[in-house]
Image (tube, helix red, strand yellow):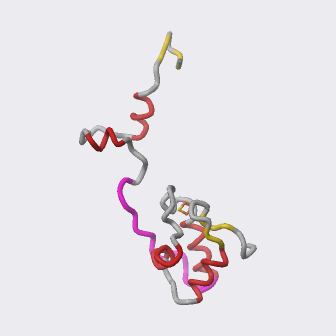
């Protein structure tokens, strides 16, 4: 991979930046996150997590199964503020999308 390759699209963090912090002692995704903001974007590391693990593996030789997973914060998936405000317990992301679909003669309008 080229050094200028963007690893974290959300925060525009390149492979070069990731490798620099690994060279300075970072060994986990959370270390790299604190030093670069990698993983703090809207996808919350769903895209860059594996690429960062690959960079750690390549630079340090740490096996993938020994690289800790990043800490996750709630909510894991986007939800409506309306759902939070009403303290709904029947939330599911699929249901919230389907709630907005209007049918007319069995077809989506
Ligand atoms: S790609 Fe890294 S936080 Fe989204």
Q: Residue at x 51, y 70 (%)?
A: 37
Please identify the residue farthest to the bottom as the structure is shown: 24
| Camera-nearest residue between 60 and 10 | 10
Q: Residue at x 53, y 16 (%)?
A: 107
Magenta stretch, main secondary structure class: loop
Q: Residue at x 50, y 10 (%)?
A: 105
Residue stretch in magenta: 59-75
64 in magenta: yes
| Residue 96 vertical placement versus 67 (above, below) | above
Q: Is residue 54 left or right of residue 45?
A: right
Quadrant of the rendered image containing residue 9: bottom right
Residue 38: percent from left, percent from top: 53, 69
Q: Is residue 94 left or right of residue 3?
A: left
Residue 32: percent from left, percent from top: 51, 77
Residue 98: percent from left, percent from top: 44, 29
Residue 18: percent from left, percent from top: 60, 77
Q: From this viewpoint, is residue 66 visible?
A: no
90 in magenta: no
Q: From this viewpoint, is residue 22 visible?
A: yes
């Amino acid at each position: 991979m080229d050094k200028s390759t963007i690893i974290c699209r959300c925060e525009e963090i390149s492979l070069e930046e990731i490798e620099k912090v690994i060279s300075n002692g970072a060994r986990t995704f959370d270390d790299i996150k604190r030093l670069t903001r990698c993983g703090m974007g809207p996808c919350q590391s769903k895209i860059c997590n594996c690429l960062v693990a690959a960079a750690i593996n390549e630079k340090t030789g740490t096996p993938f199964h020994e690289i800790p997973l990043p800490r996750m914060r709630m909510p894991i998936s986007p939800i409506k503020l309306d759902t939070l405000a009403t303290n709904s317990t029947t939330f599911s992301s699929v249901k919230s999308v389907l709630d907005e679909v209007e049918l007319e003669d069995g077809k989506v309008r």
